[in-house]
Image (cartoon, grey):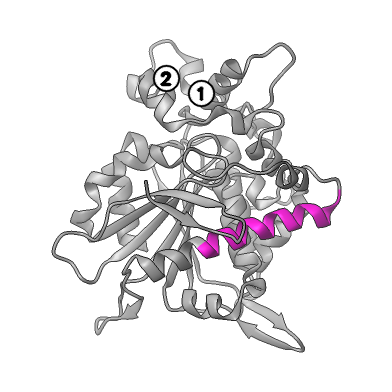
Amino acid sequence: MPLAPVDDHGSVLYYEDTGPPPGCTVYKTLVLVHGAGFHGASFRRMIPFAAEHNLRFIIPNLRDYPGSTPYTQQELQELRGPSREQQEKALRARASELAAFLQWLIQIGDIPSAHDSSDGSTTGGIALLSWSAGNCQTMALFAYADQLPKETRKLLDAYLRSYVLYEPSLASTGGPVPAGLQAIKAVREPGMSLDDLNAAFSTSVSAYYPPFTFPHAIDPIPNYPPRVALHEQSDHVDHRLTPTTTRMSPEELRETVRAEVVDTFGSQNLLRKLDPAIYKANVERALFDRRFAFGDALEEVWPALRVHVVWCDMSVGDCVWASVLLHVRHAAADVEWRRPMTLHKLEGANHFVHWDDPERFVKTLAGII
């Protein structure tokens, strides 16, 4: 079982690795970071399409997920800590773990570095994709880049080519959502079992909703009517448009879900409930100003990094709105110092397009990273 050390306390991340595409010495490496509840196994349907697109997939499980080190009680206490300082300390630790994971992969994985080809394209290197709530942690990697060791920053500068925010969660942006778009059921009500919470969360987040169109402006925030999932509107909806998780077998759900982390005191729920101001500030540092203060000087960190936001128009409202917020905030940021960011819409897709249509999703990623 492949394990990567990520700190000085013995913590490890379990990961899966497709290896280099057969016959290739130069290829792109895509690190796929999962979201809340659903861990890295949910990306396995993408694996058969990696080699034909000259891609290598590396799929880690974050802390508290199968194969990786659980959080200690002290780490959980920092996540639930009442002060912003404690919560930021917890997120910086997660950023350090991700940086250590990438550094370890580079040092032991024989991954080709990024370099420009004669046709202007870039080959080799690492693209970091983060799905949904996984962006709470990956965003911290870029937001706290200045606090990484200089050697680590320099190493990652030679390899990191792009950051893909795949269906980012609302929590990871630190923004509010219009009431009509709220749909994710992630709160365990009195008397509700963990199984019932998991079913409600999974169904709501993997449902298909009416196609969403970006608003022309969000000031004032549009007043949206309730956005009801298609399967709740009719008993005769196309089977392919029913919630993804309701079409999974019990075995597939067991292999892809760790429900405990989204429970009331579970680590993923604690991450979701961190001070929104922390996440909002992290977005600013990570995406909208690539300069960091080192003493009295401002220096650019990973200036060649490109950002891509992949959003699905039939996804849950919390996530489509997160993409709206990122688009608006990027447009308002300083053009000279913001990171290049491109939005990519997948039509007719929900929050689980990597499961429902993996071939299309891999082809999309291959064309943008």
Q: Are marks 2 and 1 in contact (CB under 8 Å)?
A: yes
Number of other residues with Cα within 10 Å of mark 1, as a class: few under 14, some 14 to 19, many 20 or more: some
Q: Which residues are magenta?
A: 83-100
The prevailing secondary structure element of the residues shown in magenta is: helix
Q: Nearer the viewer, residue 256 or 217?
A: 256
State which quadrant residue 21 falls in.
bottom left
SS category of the residue bearing label 2: helix
Residue at 60%, 58% (x, y): give it: 139
Q: Find residue 350 and report its horizontal and vertical position in percent.
A: 44, 36
Please tell me whether residue 10 belongs to the stretch shown in magenta.
no
In the rendered view, tell whether residue 87 sits above or below residue 284. Answer: above
Q: Dividing the image into 4 quarters, which one contains the C terminus?
A: bottom left
Q: Find residue 36 and report its horizontal and vertical position in percent.
A: 55, 38
Q: Amino acid at mark 1?
A: Thr
- According to the image, label 1 marks what residue? 203
Q: Nearer the viewer, residue 82 or 16?
A: 16
- According to the image, label 2 marks what residue? 246
Q: Nearer the viewer, residue 23 or 6?
A: 6
Residue at 33%, 80% (x, y): give it: 115
In the rendered view, tell whether residue 27 sits above or below residue 135. Answer: below
Q: Amino acid at mark 2?
A: Thr
Q: Find residue 75 and report its horizontal and vertical position in percent.
A: 71, 47
Q: Find residue 347 and report its horizontal and vertical position in percent.
A: 39, 42
SS category of the residue bearing label 1: helix
Q: Is residue 121 visible to us here?
A: yes
Q: Which mark is residue 233?
A: none
Tell me the distance, in whole angstroms, between the alpha carbons under discs 2 and 1.
7 Å
Please tell me whether residue 84 belongs to the stretch shown in magenta.
yes
Task: Residue lying at the far bottom in this picture: please name it.
Answer: 297
Of pointers 2 and 1, the one earlier in the residue sequence: 1
State which quadrant residue 270 falls in.
top right
